[in-house]
Image (spheres, rainbow, N blue to C red):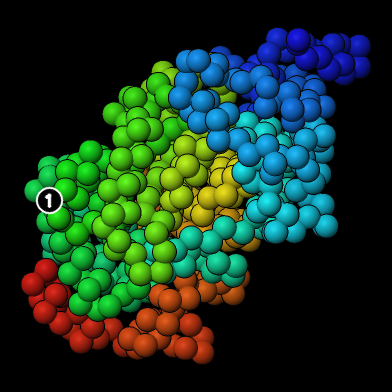
Amino acid sequence: MSFASTLGSVTYRFASLRELFAKASPRRSADELAGVAAESETERVAAQRALADVPLRRILDEQVIPYESDDVTRLVVDTHDARAFERLRSLTVGELREWFLDDRTTAADCAAVRAGLTPEMVAAASKLMRNQDLIAAAQKCLVEKRFRNTIGAKGTLAVRLQPNHPTDDAAGIAASIVDGLLLGSGDAVIGINPASDSPSNVERLLHLMDELIARLEIPTQSCVLTHVTTQMDLMRQGVPLDLVFQSIAGTEATNKSFGVTLSMLQEAHAQALELRRGTLGSSVMYFETGQGSCLSAGGNHGVDAQTCEARAYAVARAFDPLLVNTVVGFIGPEYLYDGKQIIRAGLEDHFCGKALGLPMGVDVCYTNHAEADQDDMDTLLTLLGVAGCAFVIGVPGADDIMLNYQSTSFHDALYLRKSLGLRPSPEFEAWLVRSGLFDAQRLLPTGAGDVQRLLGAWGESHGGR
């Protein structure tokens, strides 16, 4: 059964739910590149009007990617909680939007229904929202997770300390870690994108961070963002590994292009749980995603970029992750052309992830060939802070010299915390104060800069001065 919407004297028809979703999406270059976007703003509005009237039951029954051909679809359908869905069962997409925005809808309400929501349902609702709607709805979706500290608590903003180096030089990485800690970053994770994925190099980096965290008794966790199979091999060898990382996407074909299957993730998750390295909780996974990855891999099946992205969050929530973040502007302008599209995508991803029960972070970023600049990133960063984003990325000077893209800095996170009254994770904040790095009253760096006292032998052995 097709969908139709009449504007004036013109009737627009949409042959399938997949086409309707794509035509209703706010403009972005990925959908135009894929040839699925609305041909005009009028057609887009018509699609949005038709989408608003679609019953949620229809979305549950009609899959945008067939059950038989995609394991992500099978995961969504097979794990759907009918009891949690019952209170929303009679709603349309437009009414789901209104439900999220209703002043009577609480954080407890959002938590009660999230297992009954599919990624396609929340993606559909987000397509009908303006930016302030995405912010207001995301504020209500509180998600807390724990490993060695608490991520996502109300009123907090964590930071992934990202000390990447183009040659994985220990002194350069150590200097960036010191810089980040002195400025209050690192509570989400100290996570390195290695320049070399060799197992020996990854092992060296894991030992480096494990030694630091243990020596200083920092309530945080470490991660080296290499392929999951490398991490599984290292865990078998007894290498100290806190969080298992993997990039994921919303279709089986795209995940296969990453060299990943759901069963592989299940095995890695079980391995990490057996290590019992968490002190407060057992959320041991870290996932990264990004709009456009399915199209880039030729695995989008004609589905729009934002719906594919929301489906990745169904993969993530199956493994109770500590951290999930969309690397929103990293893939490039072919997929998100300019600052306007990046800002919109970041807010969509953040809302959809939280609505599905994820501790959602965003890498507020862009590549240098996109029509975007740091002012756009300041805008998105501030909007995400208002929306209740769990964590952002901290890179020295906001310039990742290994991955060659622009992100946010340690100082940007300080700005956001100070401006909005946000705090680090509670356990990490107590450590910052206890270590004399932060003023307990103003929660700002003391400026003491006593790196030698802080790091001692670790700093000397890894290039500290």
The residue closer to the viewer here, 114 or 175, is 114
* 192 to the left or right of 236: right
* 217 to the left or right of 240: right
* 169 to the left or right of 97: left
**Vertical relation: 279 (above or below) 57:** below
Residue at the location (34% across, 64% down)?
278
Farthest-out residue, right: 8
The residue closer to the viewer here, 171 or 116, is 116
**Vertical relation: 289 (above or below) 12:** below
Q: Position of residue 365 (x, y in %)?
A: 44, 47
Q: Quadrant of residue 348?
A: top right
Residue at the location (22% across, 44% down)?
232
Total numbered labels:
1
Quadrant of the frame with the C terminus: bottom left
Quadrant of the frame with the N terminus: top right
Q: Position of residue 350 (x, y in %)?
A: 57, 48
Where disc 1 sits, the SS reads loop
Q: Quadrant of residue 197?
A: top left
* 120 to the left or right of 454: right
The residue closer to the viewer here, 431 or 242, is 242
**How many residues crowd mark 1 within 10 Å: few (<14), some (14–19), many (20+)?**
few
**Vertical relation: 338 (above or below) 195:** above
Kind of residue indicated by mark 1: Gln
Disc 1 target residue: 237
Q: Position of residue 460 (x, y in %)?
A: 10, 76
**Vertical relation: 452 (above or below) 332:** below
Residue at the location (35% across, 61% down)?
189
Q: In the rendered image, is residue 60 in sight?
A: yes
Q: Position of residue 302 (x, y in %)?
A: 54, 16
Q: In the rendered image, is residue 23 in sight?
A: no
Residue at the location (44% across, 39% down)?
289
